[in-house]
Image: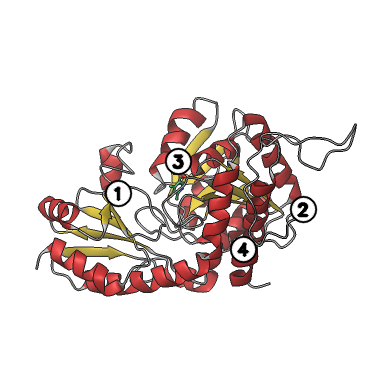
Amino acid sequence: MKKETVCVHGAGDYGFDDPTGAVCVPIYQSATFKHKGLNKSTGFDYSRLSNPTRLAVEKTVAALEGGAGASAFSTGMAAISALCEIFSPGDGIVASHDLYGGAIRLFRNISQKNGLTVDFADTSDLDAVRAAIKPNTRAVFIETPTNPMMLVSDVEAIAKIAKPLGILTIVDNTFLTPYFFKPLSLGADIVVHSGTKFLCGHNDTLAGFLASATAELAEKFITVEKTTGACLSPFDSFLVLRGIKTLGLRMERGQQNAFEIAKFLSAHPRVKKVYYAGLESNGGYEILKRQAEGFGCMISFEVDSVETVERVLGGVKLIAFAESLGGAETLVTYPAVQTHADVPKNERDARGINDRLLRLSVGIENAGDLIEDLAAALGR
Ligand SMILES: *Cc1c(COP(=O)(O)O)cnc(C)c1O
């Protein structure tokens, strides 16, 4: 089945039969499941271990990513925390230096305390990846394109470096989603998602996923999920399943809008730089053209002054000044004070996350309306 069909119909076989013939997977809002007798489980015993609605969304995400299995967590950060549980004190992780702020906070403040060493490197530079790998390195954690600088990593080349060394390649695929990008098919071992974003797609719930290339890894995450307990609720599982049905339509439309907005911003006198993976001027354009089926809906741009930032954030009417991304609604974010506030200022500056940088999550509204809103807020 092609990806558009998988989005609508899911994995097909959810591993359970609903006797009513419901077209949509029902919300099995039950903490526990009764047994007909000794050793006569329906396959479901207690919802932390497994729940039919959650199983359906897990199988759908696994099918979309082309993985052997997937586990659904209450948030993206819960998924990344669960991921860290497969490592042991003394193990090392090499992570993209331009990473989601929450992932940096987790690695710095919690993983290191638990004995993992985390080295940040520019994973868009293969030499930097090779140089960062140490004898204790167990994984390379990549975000591509990165948040917020849109740096693109060559996942295939990194997996080729990592695999012979027994190092796992892990990709946060939140931005491109399996609709545009399939890291497991390029040799990655694990895909991470903030399902809160494009997978759910409506800014109305939080979710996280880990999809694995092998059954062995998938089994490890099932054990972590049921043991540490941050699993996705039945209702939230339903919302993500519902969101995924329109993933393809939303990604196509958001990307189309993003191209038009990137073009508008590039020509605007108050805009100094535009970072969009779909622009040929973006460093990773050629890699994505080869490895992905799209460039996504995320744009960062640098304006001429902090005054312009203030005017944009206070002036947009249709676009909401709010954290997060990936929903039907277009949002504008100020990384230096929102998502990346916890990253030390000197590091932010070195990476271009200065106080003139804004990030757009382009939604599925009319592109002309969005451009008009931006134009009015930017001033001419
Ligand atoms: C939002 C986000 C996360 C964290 O997900 P939550 O659902 O907010 O916990 C991780 N990675 C990326 C790229 C994100 O955008």
Near mark 4 (Cα within 10 A), the count class, few <14, some 14-19 or many ≥20, is some
> In the rendered structure, which disc, 2 or 3, sits on the residue that comes first in sequence?
2
Marks 4 and 2 sit apart, C-alpha to C-alpha, by: 28 Å
Q: What is the distance, in whole Å, between disc 4 and disc 1 at their CAs?
A: 34 Å
Residue matched to label 4: 186
Q: Quadrant of the C terminus?
A: bottom left
Label 1 crowd bin: few (<14), some (14–19), many (20+), radius 10 Å: some
Foreground label between 4 and 2? 2
Q: Secondary structure at mark 2?
A: loop
Q: CA distance from mark 1 to mark 2?
A: 39 Å
Q: Which label's residue is closer to the chain start, 1 or 3? A: 3
- The residue indicated by pointer 2 is 15
Foreground: disc 1 or disc 3? 1
Q: Say whether residue 225 is left or right of residue 195.
A: right
- 178 or 53, which is in the foreground? 53
Q: Amino acid at mark 3?
A: Ala
SS state under label 4 = helix
Q: State the image coordinates of residue 185 (x, y, percent, origin top left).
A: 64, 63
Residue with the mark numbered 1: 322
Which amino acid type is shown beneath numbered disc 1?
A: Ala
| Of callouts 4 and 3, the N-terminal one | 3
Q: From the viewer's side, name the closer residue of 42 and 139.
A: 42
Residue 103 tag number: 3
Q: Residue furthest front?
A: 20
Asked if the residue at tag 2 contacts the one at tag 1, i.e. Cβ–Cβ closer than 8 Å, the answer is: no
Q: Above or below — where is 164 with respect to 347?
A: below
Q: For disc 1, does the CB lie below 8 Å from ligand 1?
A: no
